[in-house]
Image: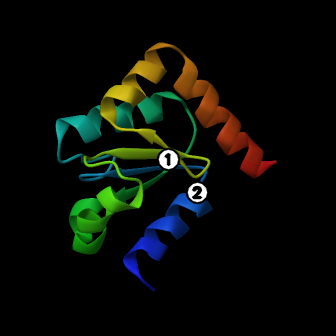
Amino acid sequence: MDVLERIDQVVKSNPVVIFMKGTPQMPQCGFSMRAAQALQACGKEFAHVNVLMDPEIFENLPRYADWPTFPQIYINGELIGGCDITLEMFQQGELQKAVTEAVDKTSA
């Protein structure tokens, strides 16, 4: 399977996924840490991909959604953005709503 197909499969098979440097438990960069903390504060489970463990994903994820940086957060198969957008959405209460709706929809 081609790397862009693998990325697409992860994005489409998880209601919420963060592609980050490290893991939510052991982030390897401050931006990834803050974005993962915002997702964790939503109180719902989410998937994560450690881009440092997969050089192909690290190199090709920026091409997938034309977004050059990490982390990248996807909800319902759509790119939400990176750290700044995620934190802004969290502060406005929009992230919690989007995450809850996405997770509850797939578990219903």
Cα distance, mark 2 to mark 1? 9 Å
Circle 2/circle 1 CB separation < 8 Å: yes
Q: Earlier in the sequence, mark 2 or mark 1?
A: 2
Q: Position of residue 33 (x, y in %)?
A: 27, 37
Is residue 62 toward the left or the right of residue 98 in the image? Answer: left
Task: State the residue in front, 24 or 72.
Answer: 72
Which quadrant would the N terminus be assigned to in this image?
bottom left
Furthest residue in direction left, as rendered: 29
Mark 1: which amino acid? Answer: Tyr
Q: Position of residue 59 (x, y in %)?
A: 23, 66
State the residue position of label 2.
14
Task: State the residue in front, 92 or 40.
Answer: 92
In this rendering, the label closer to the viewer, 2 or 1? 1
Furthest residue in direction right, as rendered: 108
* Residue located 76% across and 44% down the image: 105
State the residue position of label 1.
74
